[in-house]
């Protein structure tokens, strides 16, 4: 499944394995923090906003 993994993820994984999260943050810094923030922003938007909205709009006609 590593075919589908972007190259920068493989690079970050290798750095983390080599020296842990401290070395990863030291080498990549704000890029890791921004990627982490965006991942959770997108994930939480889907889980807590989009899915409930779609459920509400589809069930609204039943009541």
Image: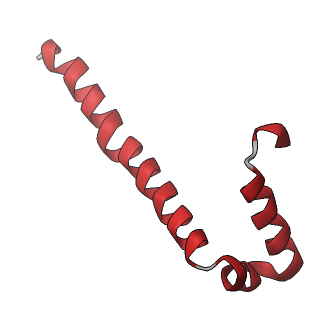
Residue 29 placement: quadrant: bottom right
- Against 55, is 23 above or below? below
Q: Is residue 35 left or right of residue 20?
A: left
Going 84% across and 82% down the picture, which residue do you hit?
19
Q: Residue furthest top?
A: 62
Q: Is residue 59 left or right of residue 38?
A: left
Position in image of residue 42 (x %, y %): 43, 49
Residue 2 placement: quadrant: top right
Position in image of residue 44 (x %, y %): 41, 51
Position in image of residue 24 (x %, y %): 72, 78
Name the quadrant of the N terminus: top right
Foreground: 58 or 31? Answer: 31
Q: Residue furthest left?
A: 63
Going 29% across and 36% down the picture, which residue do you hit?
52
- Against 11, is 21 above or below? below
Q: Residue furthest right?
A: 18
| Colour convention of the picture | secondary structure
- Against 59, is 3 above or below? below
Q: Is residue 61 left or right of residue 42?
A: left
Position in image of residue 7 (x %, y %): 77, 52
Going 76% across and 84% down the picture, which residue do you hit?
23
User: Number of labelled discs?
Assistant: 0
Name the quadrant of the C terminus: top left
Going 73% across and 58% down the picture, which residue do you hit?
8
Foreground: 22 or 27? Answer: 27
Q: Is residue 38 left or right of residue 53?
A: right
Residue 25 placement: quadrant: bottom right
Foreground: 18 or 62? Answer: 18
């Amino acid at each position: 499944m590593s075919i589908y993994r972007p190259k920068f993820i493989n690079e970050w994984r290798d750095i983390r394995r080599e020296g842990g999260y401290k070395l990863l943050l030291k080498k990549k810094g704000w890029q890791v923090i921004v990627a982490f923030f965006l991942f959770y922003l997108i994930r939480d938007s889907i889980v807590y906003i989009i899915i409930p909205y779609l459920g509400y709009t589809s069930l609204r006609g039943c009541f």
